[in-house]
């Protein structure tokens, strides 16, 4: 099996292998866990030998046990339903990552080791890295301290919006995320009588959607971190019980968000904040909803954000990148599993060790017009060797493995077989299979392995 954490680590290791010239410098990973996820995360890493990354290059920082929950506008503390002597607590929010990086001196150690850039991403978004090189280029060109990854956003869509705010008294400006439920009233209160509406020329809101992929210049980030000790502004976002708006529907909390970091930047640094907006199908596909919730969201015209859509979007991003350089890729028709409609084919999986940045695809496919992949196909490319695919017609399932040290060329390859097919499932007892609603039946697969002995092994 292959999981998200493995993918992220393999991507980091691929960047290390390709783009780090100093053998004494190592890219690292820091994971923020909670009391609920800490033990499981550590066990997953240890059971899999940290997926090839040195243990000392992985840092785990754990959030506290939460903050007291509140019942109403008077901040009455909520008690546990079954224990009148115990406060009910809730998570404080992902803004805690900044205080944890300060408290454990993680950012300080990174800067001291020579780290120039720090990227923040949420583990539910498997497409987080596809556009990282682009964001890095924008940050360098615009001299940004903080760069927020963003997507085109529909007006009133339930996604935070990137806005540029101006203080009328001081003239100071600040580029920052505004939560979607605050944006419309903020606009109406400041001369925009229509509120948050779509631009008729683009069909989207002028304010792009924040996806919590953040890129920081390391040194000024650390400087600001030391001044604020990583503390982000707190807020309450209650849902009220009735029109009186005094009592909450359910206990809420003080929370903080990592994207609010611009609030602690001062002087000229406050102006070195920007965003990079990219099509969502290349950079944003969160897997955070149960299947039933995903069905309900999709019926409303919103991305389902569940297991089936997350997997489909991974394949789709690879297809889009290949198509953009000229490879002939035909999409399959939408399929529905457990009520979620997805376009799954052709399934294309490219391991980070083979190609980790979109720009590398052109090196592997120097003549993309001579490569075609049918809608029912499945293609897996893996291995860290140098692979060149000059010409290929695929109508079925193919696994290409170019092992470390190998230098191989695929030329005039024609593959036609029964391939892999999907079968709908209900309750198999396997959580992953049941979440996505189908299983893959591998009827026939062409497997080709190239090794450094210049041998080609065909199965």
Image (spheres, rainbow, N blue to C red):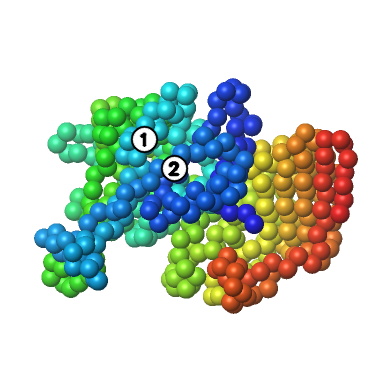
Residue 246 position within the rendered picture, expressed as x and y whole percent measured from the top left: 13, 66
According to the picture, the residue beneath numbered tag 1 turns out to be: 104
Say if residue 290 shows up in the picture.
yes
Q: Quadrant of the C terminus?
A: bottom right
Q: CA distance from mark 1 to mark 2?
A: 10 Å
Residue 341 position within the rendered picture, expressed as x and y whole percent measured from the top left: 56, 70
User: Left or right of 42: which side holds 356?
Assistant: right
Tell me if residue 53 comes above or below residue 33 in the rendering: above
Q: Residue furthest bottom?
A: 426
Number of marks in the rendered image? 2
Say if residue 201 shows up in the picture.
no
Residue 215 position within the rendered picture, expressed as x and y whole percent measured from the top left: 43, 37
Residue 370 position within the rendered picture, expressed as x and y whole percent measured from the top left: 80, 47
Query: Which residue lies at the image location 32% right of the left edge and 45% below the top edge?
Result: 96
Q: Quadrant of the N terminus?
A: bottom right
Other-residue count near label 1 (Cα within 10 Å), few / some / many at <14 / 14–19 / ≥20: few
According to the picture, the residue beneath numbered tag 2 turns out to be: 60
Which residue occupies the foreground of this view, 156 or 191?
156
**Label 1: element kind:** loop
Tell me if residue 288 comes above or below residue 163 in the rendering: below
**Label 2: element kind:** strand
- Kindly indicate the quadrant of the structure image that contains residue 17: top right
Tell me if residue 15 comes above or below residue 196 in the rendering: above
User: Left or right of 2: which side holds 29?
Assistant: left
Query: Which residue lies at the image location 83% right of the left edge and 49% below the top edge?
Result: 448
């Amino acid at each position: 099996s292959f999981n998200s954490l493995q993918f992220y680590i393999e991507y980091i290791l691929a960047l290390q292998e390709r783009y780090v010239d100093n053998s004494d410098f190592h890219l690292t990973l820091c994971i923020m866990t909670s009391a609920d996820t800490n033990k499981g995360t550590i066990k997953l890493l240890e059971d899999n030998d940290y997926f090839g990354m040195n243990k000392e290059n992985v840092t785990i920082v754990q959030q506290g046990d939460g903050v007291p929950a509140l019942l109403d506008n008077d901040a009455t503390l909520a008690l546990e339903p079954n224990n009148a002597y115990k406060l009910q607590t809730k998570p404080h929010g992902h803004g805690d990552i900044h205080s944890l990086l300060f408290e454990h001196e993680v950012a300080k150690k990174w800067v001291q080791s020579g780290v120039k850039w720090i990227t923040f991403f949420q583990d539910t978004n498997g497409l987080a890295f596809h556009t990282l090189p682009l964001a890095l280029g924008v940050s360098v060109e615009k001299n940004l301290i903080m760069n927020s990854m963003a997507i085109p956003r529909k007006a009133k869509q339930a996604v935070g919006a990137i806005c540029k705010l101006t203080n009328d008294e001081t003239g100071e400006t600040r580029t920052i995320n505004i939560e979607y439920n605050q944006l419309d009233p903020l606009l109406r209160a400041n001369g925009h009588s229509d509120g948050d509406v779509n631009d008729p020329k683009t069909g989207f809101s002028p304010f792009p959607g924040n996806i919590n992929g953040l890129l920081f210049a390391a040194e000024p980030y650390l400087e600001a971190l030391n001044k604020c000790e990583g503390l982000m502004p707190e807020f309450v976002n209650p849902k009220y019980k009735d029109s009186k708006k005094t009592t909450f529907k359910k206990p809420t909390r003080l929370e903080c968000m990592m994207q609010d970091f611009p609030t602690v930047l001062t002087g000229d640094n406050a102006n070195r904040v920007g965003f990079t907006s990219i099509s969502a199908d290349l950079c944003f596909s969160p897997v955070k909803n149960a299947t039933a919730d995903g069905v309900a969201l999709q019926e409303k015209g919103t991305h389902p954000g569940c297991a089936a859509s997350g997997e489909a979007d991974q394949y789709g991003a690879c297809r889009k990148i290949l198509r953009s350089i000229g490879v002939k890729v035909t999409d399959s028709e939408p399929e529905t599993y457990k009520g979620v409609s997805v376009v799954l084919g052709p399934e294309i999986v490219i391991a980070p060790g083979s190609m980790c940045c979109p720009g590398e695809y052109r090196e592997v496919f120097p003549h993309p017009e001579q490569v075609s992949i049918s809608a029912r196909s499945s293609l897996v490319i893996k291995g860290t060797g140098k692979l060149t695919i000059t010409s290929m017609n695929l109508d079925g399932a193919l696994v290409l493995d170019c092992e470390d040290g190998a230098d191989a060329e695929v030329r005039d390859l024609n593959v036609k077989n029964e391939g892999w097919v999907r079968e709908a499932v209900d309750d198999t007892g396997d959580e992953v299979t049941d979440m996505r609603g189908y299983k893959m039946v591998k009827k026939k697969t062409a497997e080709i392995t190239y090794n450094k002995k210049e041998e080609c092994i065909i199965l």
